[in-house]
Image (tube, rainbow, N blue to C red):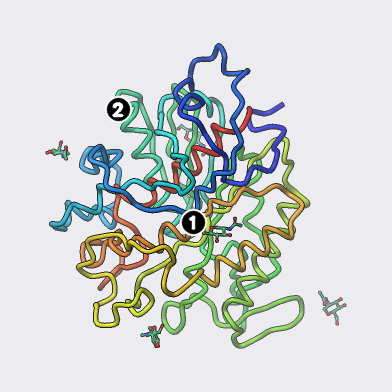
Amino acid sequence: MGVFGGAIFVVLSLLVIERAVTTLGHAKGEREETAETGSCDASAGTWVYDSSYPLYNSSQCPFLENQFKCLENGRHDAGYLKYRWKPAGGCDLPRFDGRGFLSRLRGKKLMFVGDSLSLNQWQSLTCMVHTAVPEAKYTSTTVDGLSNFSFPEYGVELMFFRDAFLVDIVSTSTGRALQLDSLQNAKLWEGTDVLVFNSWHWWLHVGRKQPWDYIQEGNKTYKDMDRLVAYEKALNTWAKWVDSRVDPSKTTVFYQGVSPDHANASDWGQPKADACLDQTRPLAVSRYPAGPHPAELVAEKVIRSMTFPVRLLNVTYLSQLRVDGHPSVYGFGGHRNMDCSHWCLAGVPDTWNLFLYQSLVAHKF
Ligand SMILES: *[C@@H]1O[C@H](CO)[C@@H](O)[C@H](O)[C@H]1NC(C)=O
Ligand SMILES: *[C@@H]1O[C@H](CO)[C@@H](O)[C@H](O)[C@H]1NC(C)=O
Ligand SMILES: *[C@@H]1O[C@H](CO)[C@@H](O)[C@H](O)[C@H]1NC(C)=O
Ligand SMILES: *[C@@H]1O[C@H](CO)[C@@H](O)[C@H](O)[C@H]1NC(C)=O
Ligand SMILES: *[C@@H]1O[C@H](CO)[C@@H](O)[C@H](O)[C@H]1NC(C)=O
């Protein structure tokens, strides 16, 4: 049975006791370790100040892209680095044990598939692991949209495949067709042990940033479509592929969850603010003023309809509270003007990776 074999659907509300985490890497006793399942839901909670944060020093992560290096790009307030997610209900996210993570993943491939928010989370994970094993050799290459960060001594490959829509865009004589029911890239994902999918932000692009000319579904073509409807159709195509082509005893599949942007400060009740600029603190509220993210609701609906036990990283709400977590004007090389979509690193995606880590370690291998 594979390392992630025998997947049981574990919603990310496992109570991972500190013990289950700190014993990681001690091969002996590992087998007996069972994750205690409690009623702790890590998706709800609050951000608390923690002087031990951040999880790594971004300037000691040599491969981090400029667009995420807010401090190095001149951001002066460093408070945003100091917050730890505290789930409601008395449970804590595990501490990240990078060495144990590599041992668990020995001989395995993990791949993020999606847009630049996947890049954001992948970069966060590689920084977290590199910081844990700074002496370990790594190689990093990018060929044809596939970035491959590997730790040869562990035989671990952490990859990122850029694929903003998951479904295909095909050039035809009449223009670029966004094909909602076609998934040609899927063959590149096969043979990966852990897949982490994400798509949303590109569905919103119109005008020059929109990389397609019309939408195609079966024999029908559309000039345009409600973007949430198109997103749902595409996710259903993805879901069908996962349900029919992925073996849950060999492959663990995550959905990264929808990463919210903070481009409109009315969403959190500060209509006078200039998007996320100059936000220095997480929102201290018990409900995000604009409510749940509509795309997240679509993703949850599709995942619920699947037979494959996809694990959702339910990080949308905790990210909605982090109006302070974006590069804003300190994201050189990313957005041209103000970037309230991506996240500074170190930062919020580190917590997404704690969810990923929690799920992978809490699971009996
Ligand atoms: C995700 O988290 C939010 C906020 O806690 C919650 O309302 C929602 O039900 C969760 N979704 C799933 C599928 O667990
Ligand atoms: C991060 O690393 C840089 C370069 O090594 C160092 O100058 C800086 O003091 C470190 N920052 C913190 C908060 O430790
Ligand atoms: C990733 O890089 C490692 C080390 O160079 C290599 O062994 C492996 O084949 C690469 N994987 C892919 C999918 O290219
Ligand atoms: C597309 O049209 C052709 C010819 O009319 C038909 O044979 C085929 O079944 C159609 N395909 C779909 C997916 O509707
Ligand atoms: C921002 O949100 C408010 C209310 O949520 C809406 O009325 C307004 O049109 C939005 N502004 C932009 C630029 O989208």
Name the amino acid type tagged 1: Arg
- Which-is-in-front pick, marks 1 and 2? 2
Task: Name, please, the residue furthest toward the bottom.
Answer: 223
Q: Which residue is mark 2?
A: 134
Q: Nearer the viewer, residue 44 or 21?
A: 44
Residue 148 on image: x %, y %:
46, 41
* Residue 188 left/right relative to 114: right
C-alpha gap between disc 1 and disc 2? 27 Å
Ligand 2 rendered quadrant: top left
Dividing the image into 4 quarters, which one contains the C terminus? top right
Q: Nearer the viewer, residue 170 or 76?
A: 76
Name the amino acid type tagged 2: Pro
Look at 72% across and 40% down and name the residue there. Answer: 248
Look at 49% across and 38% down and name the residue there. Answer: 357
Mark 1 element type: strand
Q: Which residue is mark 1?
A: 162
Sequence-wise first label, 1 or 2: 2
* Residue 1 left/right relative to 210: right
Contact check, label 1 and label 2, Cβ < 8 Å: no
* Residue 348 left/right relative to 224: left
Look at 57% across and 79% down and name the residue there. Answer: 227
Residue 340 on image: x %, y %:
32, 68
Q: Residues within 10 Å of mark 1 (few under 14, many from 20)?
A: some
Mark 2 element type: loop
Q: Is residue 122 above or below residue 321?
A: above
Q: Is residue 350 above or below residue 236?
A: above
* Residue 246 left/right relative to 228: right
